Image (cartoon, rainbow, N blue to C red):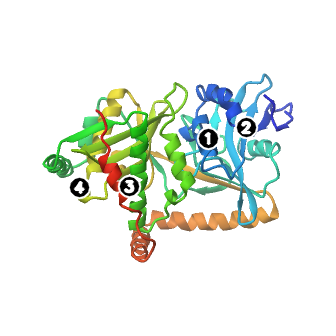
Amino acid sequence: MPATGSETATPSHALRVEIHRDIPELRDLWRNFQAVARGGPHDTWEWADAWARTAGKASAPLIAIGRDASGQILFLLPLTIRKRAGCDILEWLGAEQGNYTSGLFHPAAWTEQTLPRGKDLLARVLGALPRIDAVHLADQPLAIGNTLNPFARLPGIPAASEGHAFPLNAAWHKHFKESFSSHHRNNIRRSERQLGELGAVRFDVVEHGPVRSQVMDGIITEKRIWFADRGLPDCFANAAVREFFRLLVQIPDTDAGPAIRIFTLSVGDEIVATNLGLIYQNKFYGLIASTTAGPMRRHSPGRLLFLRLVEYLANEGIETLDCGAGEDLEKLRWCTQRRERWNAIVPVTAKGFVYAAALKSMLFIKRQIKQSPRLWNQVNRLRKWKSRFGASRPSAAADKRHSAVRVKA
């Protein structure tokens, strides 16, 4: 397969970097490598292909593949160059809607200390790419599996929020009992009884097909209402992002790729809570959780749905549930593992130095606010106040369509 650019290997580090621009053409190579590599679901061919066909149409993909002297792939990095404030910035491809992006790395190869890391590795990649002003590789996990991320030593700043996860096994009941007070557990049981008085409570796993598309539309509508109520930026205002998720949920399950899961909790004929995530390398990564905007929301159906899906995934043999980034108190009670994330920011040109300095300042302020409960509460109050005078909420018509969806058990 011809590449559009390459860097000549040096004797000290037999590493050759190729740049590819055709994602469909890379399908077999990429999927074969992700079957043995370490990385996250946002680094897979399926995620990149869905993004490039929808929300990523405006940004040309630049897929960097590193090989050793024998031709074995050592890493695969889904990258792109975007215009930011008049600068050409190297970024991850399709990372905006994910919690982690790191690229894929061959686990055996990266135990070798002779391979370049940090700035040395980045220089090899940049040598094969078009000219840029700065690098911003956002929200990278500092560790990939049990290995330090080869880009972890790049200059930058910690992400505003860490990722959170917890192990899944037969002892999840014990973990739930130890993590939550008896009062909290009684509240969940009371919520289930109250919902049951309104109709039959049903937990479902939504299969591929038209129903999955309908449920995804319901998730989008509920999240748009949720964003509007809190004065938060609405990613789903972008039609291309909506299309990305509609395409993502129809990706077929394969051994090497991410397996999409949509869990729902229904009361009678109405879906009152939904949780979208994906399974990759025997871990479940949560993407979006939503609850009805209707009156049954006061019974906390999302909390009950999460408890049901924990039991389901534990029985399925999934080893870890990754809740993603954020400071939600319910999430923090469940999670026992922290996953540090890092924004690598490297200027290349004089113009890039200015951009990088401004970006670091902005991200530093954001982190300080989110790390301060007092400041974060003030920001959220201000957002809610502004939302009262902002754009109108999305139409409730889609809510009604969502409520009418029936999901077969």
Report, in whole angstroms, how far the alpha carbon at label 3 lies from the one at label 1: 28 Å
Q: In the rendered structure, which amino acid carries the disc numbered 1?
A: Ala
Q: In the rendered structure, which amino acid carries the disc numbered 2?
A: Asp
Q: Locate residue 232, reporting x and y percent.
A: 46, 65
Does residue 313 appear left or right of residue 66 in this picture?
A: left
Residue 398 placement: quadrant = bottom left
Report, in whole angstroms, how far the alpha carbon at label 2 lies from the one at label 3: 36 Å
Q: Residue 48 carries which label?
A: 1
What is the quadrant of the N terminus in the image?
A: top right
Asked if residue 181 is positioned above or below residue 170 in the image, the reply reads below
Residue drawn at x 48%, y 67% is 369
Residue drawn at x 51%, y 66% is 368
Q: Name the residue under label 3.
A: 398
- Whether the residues at callouts 2 and 3 have beta carbons within 8 Å, the answer is no
Q: Locate residue 309, reporting x and y percent.
A: 32, 38
Q: Which mark is residue 204?
A: none
For disc 1, the neighbor class at 10 Å (few under 14, some 14 to 19, many from 20) is: many
Q: Residue 296 carries which label?
A: 4
Report, in whole angstroms, how far the alpha carbon at label 4 lies from the one at label 2: 47 Å
Does residue 29 appear left or right of residue 98 in this picture?
A: right
Find numbered disc 4 in the image and state the secondary structure of the residue it sits on.
Answer: helix
Q: Earlier in the sequence, mark 4 or mark 2?
A: 2
- Whether the residues at callouts 4 and 3 have beta carbons within 8 Å, the answer is no
For disc 2, the neighbor class at 10 Å (few under 14, some 14 to 19, many from 20) is: some
Q: In the rendered structure, which amino acid carries the disc numbered 4?
A: Met
Find numbered disc 1 in the image and state the secondary structure of the residue it sits on.
Answer: helix
Residue drawn at x 23%, y 59% is 295
Q: Name the residue under label 2.
A: 22
Find numbered disc 2 in the image and state the secondary structure of the residue it sits on.
Answer: loop
Residue 228 placement: quadrant = bottom left
Q: In the rendered structure, which amino acid carries the disc numbered 3?
A: Ala
Q: Foreground mark, 3 or 1?
A: 3
